[in-house]
Every structure is written in structure tokens, then in C-alpha cells.
């Protein structure tokens, strides 16, 4: 890829790569005084400044695809007054809005990008997933021998981040050398299985089916997956991990009566109290509802494990429609431009996988998840495939 093929300046691309890598090694629950947090903030400020300079130079008009996101942010800001009336303190409200604020990275990028820009953005996300894999998995390898733990999440909060799905999608559906694709896709699949989340496992299975349906080597890939599964089963037979894994996938009665269902019922009842504007970000959920016992001894938590129920309860119909409208619009624009072509198809699959995961897990309240979603929305709505060149890009992409 030659320099002239990019709309994003080299400064912006370096800042984007640095920011995504810094986010990947940021703890799932960041400490404001930690070195990783300081590095991430510095990289993000660098990205903001570099993008502002580029926007000024290009004089680029704002993208209309960002209007629903603006509605969502206005709803979130207005919720401060509502939340305070429901007993939420200012610091609690700030902690609730900070992760969503990184969806605002969408506004930073010009509204007319090239396909090379989109490919670079997805590659940055992919390498950030690799960085997460190395920094999270390598330190716990000794504890994994023999399957003596129930799941990876018992070894560190980093495994709560959905980078396993991020890495799997970008490994399977981006253009990589064959053996690199094989190594990365199997490593990320291993991590997804080892975290023992039903939702991640089922989403990963769907992603593999989509990939196999498009691959020329269906039989080879399918055989390799089956053999890997048989080998893993034999190796882990009788282990704590395998017993717990099987139980999680067979005890459907427990899943149906889990705290997730109680959370949804609680959210619906409070949504009906204030259906238009909600109860404010950070609205408290009793620990008796989600059966979580904070180490602080608190009687409530400010979140639940379903993004749709959470938004309806906290921001009402207005905030919910802003959030849904933004991603639905991004999906529609991306599909109409790219169909099954990369990088648009890759971004669409990853966005769908993350939003589906948010239906049963609270990863939507993590900075990393929202930053990745913002970049995916940029790829879907602000880049054009080569065959649909925007005339405003032609002077930058024409051969010298």
C-alpha cells in the first residue's frame, strides 16, 4: 500500500495503532493512577490532536451517520439530573458515562476514507487483540497445565474483555498469510473456550460456520477443528475445567433461572417508571437481583449484564433509540457498500458479534469495547471500496 492511497495521515495512523495497543493492555477495571492508564490517555490525546489537524486540513463535513450517536450522548448528558434525583452521586454517574464516551472516537475521523484506511484500522484492532493475548495469557500458562481451574476468568480480570472474539473475527476474515491465520484463529478459539462463556463459545461457533461456508478448504478446516476438539477432550478428560465446562452447557434449567433473567425483569419494571428518558446513567441495581457480592460490602451495583435492558432502564426510549440507531445505521451503510467484501464485511461481523455478546455480558461498560465499536463504525460508514471511489478522494489517490 502506497502512502498516497491513504487519507489518514501517517501521524493519525501511528496514533491509532498506539491507542488500540495501549487500550489492549489497559486493565478491564482501570486504575486512574496506573502506568497503563496514563499511557492510554496520552495515546488517545495524541490521536485526538492528530485527527483534529487532519480534519482542519481536509475541511471535511461531518458524517450524517453520527446523528443517532449525538442523540445518545445528549440523552446520556441529560441523564445527570435524572440520576441525581434517583440517588446516584456525581462520581457514580461519571464512572457510568466514561466508557460510552469512547464511542465519541467516531467523530474524530474524516467522513471520506479510503479502503486502505479501513484495512489499516482493522489491522490495528487485530494487533491490539494479539497484544492482549500475549500480555494476558503468557503470565497464567503455568496455571493452565492439566486443566486444574474451572475457567480463565478465575485467573485475571483481563479475560473479561471480549478480545477473544475481536481476535477470532479479524484472524479469520482479514487477508493474512495462511499459517498466520491458522495460528491466530486457533489461539483465539482456545482462549474463548477456556474462558467458558456460553455466549462467546456459541458466537465463535457461528463465526466458524460463516468462515467455513466461504472457504475453499471447508473439509480441511472442519477436520482440523474436529481433531483439535477430540485431542482437547482426551487431554482434559476428568479435569476440573472439562467437568465445569460440560456442566455450564448442559444445565439449561439453571441458565433459565439465572440472575440475568432477574436483571431484565428489574430493568423492565424500572423502565416503565420513566419510559421516555429513563432513570439516569448509574441507576442502582440491588445485589439481590444479580446475586453479586461486592468485596466492598455494597448493597447495589451500577450495571447489569444486558445492554438493551440497561439502556432502557437508564436512558429510556430516547437513549435506547440513539444507541440502536447508530449501530443499525452503520450496519446498513456498511452492507450496502461492501456486502461480503473485506474490510466492510469483517467490521460488520465483528460489530454484530460484540453487540450480541453485550446481550448477556456487561462488556459494553468497558472502555476497550466502546473504542473498538467506534472504529468499526468508522470503517462501515466512512470508507468506500475501490470500485465506489468518492470523487473527493480521487486527487489524493491518483498516481503521481
Image (spheres, grey):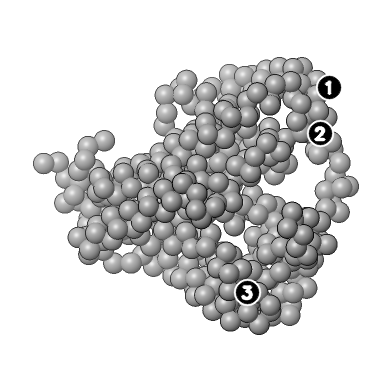
Q: Earlier in the sequence, mark 3 or mark 1?
A: 3
Q: At x 50% / y 42%, what residue is drawn? A: 25
Real-space Cα separation, disc 3 to disc 1, in angstroms: 49 Å
| Residue bearing the label numbered 2 | 244
Indicate the quadrant where residue 268 lies. Answer: bottom right
Q: At x 46% / y 24%, what residue is drawn? A: 180
Indicate the quadrant where residue 89 lies. Answer: bottom right
Measuring from the top left, give residue 202's x and y in whole percent: 69, 40
- The image's mark for residue 238 is 1
Judged from the image, the secondary structure of the residue bearing numbered disc 2 is helix
Measuring from the top left, give residue 278's x and y in whole percent: 65, 76
Q: Earlier in the sequence, mark 2 or mark 3?
A: 3
In the picture provided, is 384 more to the left or to the right than 229? left
Indicate the quadrant where residue 6 lies. Answer: top left
Figure check: 193 above or below 216: below
Residue in front for this viewpoint, 70 or 148: 148
Figure check: 27 above or below 269: above
Real-space Cα separation, disc 2 to disc 1, in angstroms: 10 Å
Judged from the image, the secondary structure of the residue bearing numbered disc 1 is loop
Real-space Cα separation, disc 2 to disc 3, in angstroms: 39 Å
Amino acid at each position: 500500500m502506497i502512502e498516497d492511497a491513504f487519507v489518514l495521515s501517517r501521524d493519525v495512523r501511528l496514533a491509532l495503532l498506539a491507542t488500540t495497543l495501549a487500550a489492549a493492555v489497559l486493565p478491564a477495571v482501570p486504575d486512574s493512577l496506573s502506568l497503563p492508564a496514563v499511557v492510554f490517555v496520552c495515546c488517545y490525546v495524541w490521536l485526538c490532536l492528530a485527527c483534529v489537524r487532519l480534519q482542519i486540513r481536509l475541511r471535511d463535513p461531518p458524517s450524517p451517520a453520527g446523528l443517532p450517536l449525538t442523540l445518545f450522548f445528549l440523552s446520556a448528558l441529560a441523564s445527570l439530573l435524572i440520576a441525581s434525583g434517583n440517588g446516584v452521586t456525581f462520581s457514580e454517574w461519571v464512572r457510568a458515562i466514561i466508557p460510552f464516551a469512547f464511542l465519541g472516537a467516531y467523530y474524530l475521523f474524516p467522513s471520506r476514507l479510503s479502503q486502505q484506511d479501513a484495512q489499516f484500522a482493522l489491522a490495528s484492532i487485530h494487533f491490539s487483540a494479539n497484544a492482549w493475548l500475549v500480555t494476558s495469557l503468557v503470565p497464567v500458562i503455568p496455571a493452565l497445565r492439566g486443566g486444574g481451574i474451572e475457567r480463565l476468568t478465575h485467573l485475571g480480570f483481563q479475560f473479561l474483555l471480549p478480545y477473544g472474539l475481536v481476535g477470532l473475527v479479524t484472524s479469520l476474515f482479514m487477508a493474512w498469510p495462511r499459517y498466520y491465520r491458522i495460528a491466530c484463529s486457533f489461539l483465539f478459539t482456545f482462549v474463548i473456550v477456556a474462558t467458558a462463556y456460553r455466549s462467546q463459545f456459541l458466537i465463535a461457533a457461528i463465526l466458524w460456520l460463516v468462515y467455513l461456508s466461504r472457504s475453499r478448504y471447508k473439509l480441511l478446516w472442519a477436520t482440523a477443528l474436529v481433531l483439535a476438539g477430540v485431542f482437547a477432550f482426551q487431554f482434559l478428560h476428568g479435569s476440573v475445567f472439562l467437568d465445569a465446562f460440560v456442566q455450564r452447557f448442559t444445565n439449561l434449567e439453571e441458565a433459565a433461572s439465572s440472575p440475568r433473567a432477574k436483571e431484565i425483569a428489574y430493568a423492565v419494571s424500572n423502565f416503565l417508571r420513566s419510559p421516555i428518558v429513563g432513570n439516569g446513567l448509574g441507576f442502582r441495581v440491588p445485589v439481590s437481583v444479580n446475586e453479586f457480592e461486592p468485596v466492598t460490602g455494597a448493597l447495589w451495583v451500577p450495571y447489569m449484564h444486558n445492554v438493551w435492558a440497561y439502556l432502557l432502564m437508564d436512558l429510556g426510549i430516547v437513549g435506547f433509540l440513539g444507541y440502536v440507531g447508530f449501530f443499525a445505521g452503520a450496519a446498513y451503510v456498511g452492507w450496502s457498500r461492501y456486502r461480503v467484501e473485506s474490510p466492510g464485511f469483517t467490521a460488520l461481523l465483528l460489530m454484530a458479534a460484540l453487540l450480541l455478546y453485550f446481550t448477556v455480558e456487561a462488556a459494553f461498560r468497558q472502555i476497550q469495547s466502546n473504542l473498538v465499536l467506534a472504529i468499526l463504525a468508522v470503517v462501515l460508514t466512512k470508507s468506500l471500496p475501490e470500485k465506489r471511489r468518492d470523487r473527493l478522494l480521487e486527487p489524493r489517490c491518483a498516481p503521481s
